Image (spheres, grey):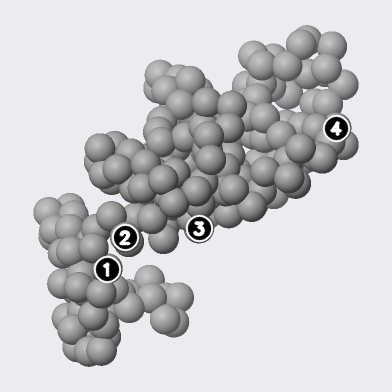
Amino acid sequence: KEITPVLHRLQEAFLVYEDQYDGEWDRGWYKFSEMFPNVNLEKYSRVEALEILLQRFAYRQVWFDDKMAKSFYKLPLKDIKTAINSLKEKEIIIEYENGYILEGDADTIKNYSQELSPCTFTLHRNDFLYRSNEHILKTLWKRSGVETLYYILIDGEFRGAAYGKFRNGPPDFSSIEVDLPNNEAIERKQEIIKSTQMLSFGKTPEKYNGENL
């Protein structure tokens, strides 16, 4: 527990590299310069590098704000705001509904329909959408005495979470909690449970919105 955090800090500084090529549990660590001898770490300034990252982030996220970018990249908000302002000056991104979008997405969004077919997805904590909204979700859905296993995206919005404890294999799956109106929560109960089972090795929760199953 002491060594791994240090290795990760060295990894973030591009001093070491973790080899995950074979997908096995054992990981090999190498000098970054040994694995990537031709990389030029001075090719971009910090702001230029962030501008590239934020354009990629905007492409995948479509709409974002500075806190979402900070949540995903774990970088200082000051640096992110500097890069955002630079992209705004270059008219690569534009302000839109208290956030930002790529300038090239503006026309698409004007003609976009917000109607969405009913759908439920269960997301783990490495999912792109979770990580970019972690600053909100980890507090909103935190419950004492249990781990938040997954987050539940219903009709395009985070409306619930699954709780228990992670194991090497099927987790202890204690409950699901959703904030849908009661009649909708009942109507979509099986749909929601089925979605969570896709990540829980088919395991069914012990409770759904406080009721035993």
Query: Which of marks 2 and 4 precedes in the sequence?
Result: 2
Q: CA distance from mark 1 to mark 3?
A: 16 Å
Does residue 40 show up? Answer: yes
Q: Which mark is residue 44?
A: 1
Q: CA distance from mark 4 to mark 2?
A: 37 Å
Amino acid residing under circle 3: Arg
Q: CA distance from mark 4 to mark 3?
A: 26 Å
Q: CA distance from mark 2 to mark 3?
A: 13 Å
Name the residue carrying label 2: 48
Q: Residue 184 sits in which quadrant?
A: top right
Tell me if residue 197 comes above or below residue 154 in the rendering.
below
Amino acid residing under circle 1: Tyr
Residue shown at the point (24%, 58%) measured from the top left: 46
Count neighbours of disc 2 (C-alpha within 10 A) and say few if under 14, some if 14 to 19, many if 20 or more.
some
Count neighbours of disc 1 (C-alpha within 10 A) and say few if under 14, some if 14 to 19, many if 20 or more.
few
Q: What is the secondary structure assignment of the residue under circle 2?
A: helix
Name the residue carrying label 3: 56
Residue shown at the point (20%, 73%) measured from the top left: 42
Does residue 133 show up? Answer: no
Count neighbours of disc 3 (C-alpha within 10 A) and say few if under 14, some if 14 to 19, many if 20 or more.
few
Amino acid residing under circle 2: Glu
**60 relative to 144 in the view: left or right:** right
Q: Nearer the viewer, mark 4 or mark 1?
A: 1
Q: Position of residue 108 (x, y in %)?
A: 75, 46
Name the residue carrying label 4: 115
Q: Position of residue 103 (x, y in %)?
A: 59, 48
* CB contact under 8 Å: marks 4 and 3: no
